[in-house]
Image (spheres, rainbow, N blue to C red):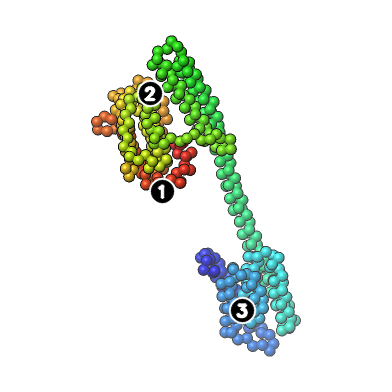
Amino acid sequence: MTLRRSWREWLDDAGLAAGAGMLGVLLLLGTLEDPPAGETISVPRDLAFGGLHCAALLLFRRRYPVAVAVTMTFTQWTATTALGATAVAMYSLAMLRPWRTLLPIAAANLALILALFRITSPDHQFRQGAVTFALLYLVLITAGMLVRSRRQLIASLEERARAAETEQRLRVEEARLLERERIAREMHDVLAHRISLLAVHAGALEFRPDAPADQREAAGIIRQNAYEAMEDLREVIGVLRDDAAGAEPERPQPTLGDVAALVQESRRAGGRVTLEEDVPDPGRIPSRVGRHAYRIVQEGLTNARKHAPGARVRVTLAAGSDLDIEIVNAVPPGPPALPLPGSGAGLVGLAERVALLGGALEHGRTGDGRFRLRARLPLETAHGAGAAGKGDTHGSELL
């Protein structure tokens, strides 16, 4: 038990034990100058017993302050030097225990000392000893209680600081949640209005009888994508608001099998996309990997439409020990005539997705004038983390 003390606590205990020894030696010297009548004091024996009391203080006063003080109250008569150790034990008791425990023990100890002095000493020595020990105990007990009060004050201030820090964190979290709700409202008010207008106009063009067939087909694609954009917007707003109690059931998450439909959708929108699949056992692909693979292909096709409109795009999926995804498109000689807006964070989001699975992502121009996006997603790690992957839907879908 004592070995668990820090070096500072050991130093404190050693200092108290040394102080108790010095006080005991001073009392012994005063007694040798004016010894009680008819008594002979053996200095080596007295010092030995005083040393034992100081050792008890060093080893046990922090763990058992009450037991040490009560024991020394009855053993201090064995040596004059033990009186100093007992006085320091009372100081330790005042420092480590409340006054309700301290006062009865200290009063009983002082009463026993005065009774002994009254029996064994003349009147002048009794009065001198009574005043000396009363003042000594008063100073030591008062000092111990002050140290205890200071420690309690410091602990109270530290607790208040921790409470204030926790309250500040809660305020920051509340402000963050309020900001998320504000963003959700802004997204709904602005984007939903624009997308609904787009869907209405596209629907009017789609069902216009005098419109050419290819325009009606294009308008139908626009209307369908506007509807899906509204669904995606509602899902993102639900995540921002984080209102699980009133939220609608989650939409089914895409899988690797939905990549073909994604490519077909790009073709209907006018893209020249080729899909090459080499996945012998699609059932072996974990849903978590399939969902990220779908998002990687989706982002690759989006980038190709933005930066290389009309260019041929080749999408390759190959499954072995890893799932390799490659999207390659030609790089146009100049900037597109009608550049589409973008945040510029798509590839950053893909890097974060791939890092979640412990994979690797490469992108950049090739030597033959094309742009290649390649991702490698490990399958074995994903199988082992399948249970954990079920809970990352919300976080990963925001990337």
SS at badge 3: helix
Task: Name the residue located 42 percent from the left edge and 30 percent from the top edge.
Answer: 343
Say which of marks 3 and 2 sits in front.
Answer: 2
Q: How many marks?
A: 3
Along the viewing direction, whichever of 155 and 187 lies nearer the viewer: 187
Q: Which residue bears the numbered disc 1?
A: 384
SS at badge 1: helix
Along the viewing direction, whichever of 100 and 383 lies nearer the viewer: 383
Q: Using the rendered image of the protein, determine whether residue 346 is visible from the camera's viewpoint.
A: no
Q: Which residue bears the numbered disc 3?
A: 81
Task: Name the residue located 64 percent from the left edge and 72 percent from the top edge.
Answer: 67
Comes first in the chain, label 3 or label 2: 3
The span from disc 3 to disc 2 (Cα, nearest Å) is 102 Å
Q: Amino acid at mark 2?
A: Arg
The span from disc 1 to disc 2 (Cα, nearest Å) is 38 Å
Q: Amino acid at mark 1?
A: Gly
